[in-house]
Image (tube, helix red, strand yellow):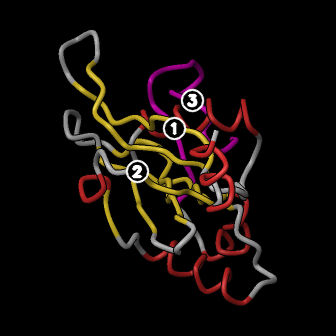
Amino acid sequence: MLDGEIVDGSKASDVVVRLAPGAGDLANAGKSMYTSLDKKIPAELALLVRCMESGDKCTDDVLNQVLNIEHILANNIEKLNKATGELEPGTRIVLITEEGTTIGTTSKGIYRSLQSIISLIGTPPFRPAIQVRIKNSPTKSGYSCLVLEFLGFKLSVEETTKKKGK
């Protein structure tokens, strides 16, 4: 039987059989994570460890604020579906500002926004930092979800001065 194989005696059904996590999974932990931080740089390694533990802020803390994002971390998680009471797979995203502030979220909308941004401008680290804003976006069903509004790249002081002078 394979991990995730659907079985019910001899025919397929809705039952999913999974192996329980074991000690050997620790060796493969890096395969379920993506980060733009460089583990060979001590300061970035320390930031990576901090990101894995928790974020400095949550999305509500920075809603509608302009954020200068340089790095990201994404790791696979299981989260509780409040409607069904079951665990389901998800992705935890940590946005890392150029100042080193970390913002954690499991928002599918932010995940999709990041996919779009990365498909257009490339993978992080973003240098110069990208400017984004986390905002609520209404859905067709009358709810709202969080998304990243891409505002552009952070301009240096020299570029800002040149732009104003024109």
Q: Which residues are magenta?
A: 1-20
* Depth order, front residue of 30/117: 117
When the figure is inspected, residue 166 is found, relative to residue 116, above or below; the finding is: below
Of the two numbered discs 1 and 3 in the rendering, the one whose residue sits closer to the viewer: 1
Residue at the bottom extreme of this rendering = 42
Which tag, 3 or 2, sits closer to the chain's start? Answer: 3
Instruction: Answer left or right for 151 relative to 27.
Output: left
Residue furthest toward the right? 40
Q: Is residue 48 above or below residue 120?
A: below
Amino acid carrying label 3: it is Ile
- In this view, the residue in front, 18 or 68, is 68
Q: Mark 1 or 2 closer to N-term?
A: 2
Which-is-in-front pick, marks 3 and 2? 2
Please provide percent x and percent y for residue 27.
73, 74
Numbered badge on residue 139: none
Dot 1 crowding, Cα within 10 Å, few <14, some 14–19, many 20+ = few
Residue at (51, 72) in percent of width and height? 51
Q: Which residue is mark 1?
A: 151
Q: Which residue is mark 2?
A: 66
Residue 82 location (% of width, % of height): 20, 40
Q: Residue at 52% x, 32% y: name it.
A: 112
Q: Amino acid at mark 1?
A: Leu
Instruction: Give the answer, above or below, for where 18 lies relative to 69.
Output: above
* Residue on which the image places disc 3: 6
